[in-house]
Image (spheres, coloured by chain):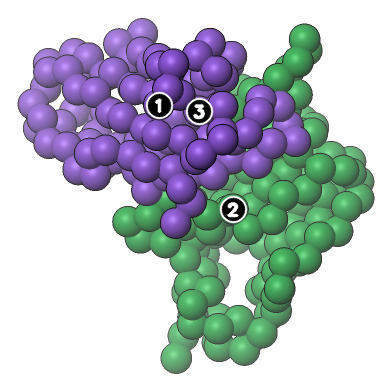
Amino acid sequence: DSGVTQTPKHLITATGQRVTLRCSPRSGDLSVYWYQQSLDQGLQFLIQYYNGEERAKGNILERFSAQQFPDLHSELNLSSLELGDSALYFCASSVGTGVYYEQYFGPGTRLTVT
Amino acid sequence: GQQLNQSPQSMFIQEGEDVSMNCTSSSIFNTWLWYKQEPGEGPVLLIALYKAGELTSNGRLTAQFGITRKDSFLNISASIPSDVGIYFCAGQLRKSGGGADGLTFGKGTHLIIQP
């Protein structure tokens, strides 16, 4: 158990809908990262927040957004969902921001868009 | 963006054999990491490497940060059934002005242990 929690574990929704994925980092960690894992693209970095502020952006679609709240939990919002958004979404956390801080991954949320 | 080439894609080995896998990149990274993922779970950090040339062990696992900063390898000695899973390499690059980009992952090596 990494100490990172994600809810829900599974989510099934229809095209065009909007969903929110939630992540609670390990105790003491200030950074949260979101990743998408799909069969064709593999594991891809989406976005990072550190202590409530956006710090790095990867291959995140404009239909997707995220935020980190004062209690440090983070939410990833996915809107106007398409079939291709079906994937595993992972949250990872680390103590700080930078190359010397190891990232620990949560169990993921499996999103199925029908 | 940066891409990591991880090989082999899959490995079929006998229990007790040693395993070797590697990752190469066309550009440098400041940090190399190795993760293992099992079905239905998130990636689990195995080894983190921070310095070119660094060789680090974690039990039966040994990994090295290539001297050119563009490659890394992971060795597993005397494999056991619980080593089955997908192994991912990941690189991270420092950003100018502080902080770092997110991790860039390889496509993974599927390790399968034959009875």
Q: Position of residue A3 (x, y in %)?
A: 46, 48
Residue at mark 1 to residue at mark 3: CA–CA distance: 8 Å
Q: Earlier in the sequence, mark 1 or mark 3?
A: 3
Which residue occupies 75% across, 24% down?
A: B94
Q: Position of residue A4 (x, y in %)?
A: 44, 43
Q: Colour of chain B?
A: green
Quadrant in which the C terminus of chain A is drawn: top left
Tell me the kind of residue under disc 2.
Leu
Q: Which residue is mark 1?
A: A73
Q: Which residue is mark 2?
A: B45
Q: Nearer the viewer, mark 2 or mark 1?
A: 1
Q: Is residue B83 left or right of residue B27?
A: left
Q: Secondary structure at mark 3?
A: strand
Chain identity of mark 2:
B
Q: Is residue B31 left or right of residue B108?
A: right
Residue at mark 2 to residue at mark 1: CA–CA distance: 21 Å
The correct choice, above or below, for B69 with respect to A71 in the image is below
Tell me the kind of residue under disc 1.
His
Residue A65 found in image quarter: top left
The correct choice, above or below, for B59 with respect to A24 in the image is below
Chain identifier matching the purple colour in the rendered picture: A
The correct choice, above or below, for B10 with respect to A49 in the image is below
Q: Secondary structure at mark 1?
A: loop
Which residue occupies 62% across, 89% down?
A: B16
Q: Is residue A20 visible?
A: yes
Check contact, mark 2 vs mark 1: CB within 8 A.
no
Q: Which residue is mark 3?
A: A32
The correct choice, above or below, for B8 with respect to A108 in the image is below
Q: Nearer the viewer, mark 1 or mark 3?
A: 1
Badge number at residue B60 = none
Check contact, mark 1 vs mark 3: CB within 8 A.
no
Chain identity of mark 1:
A
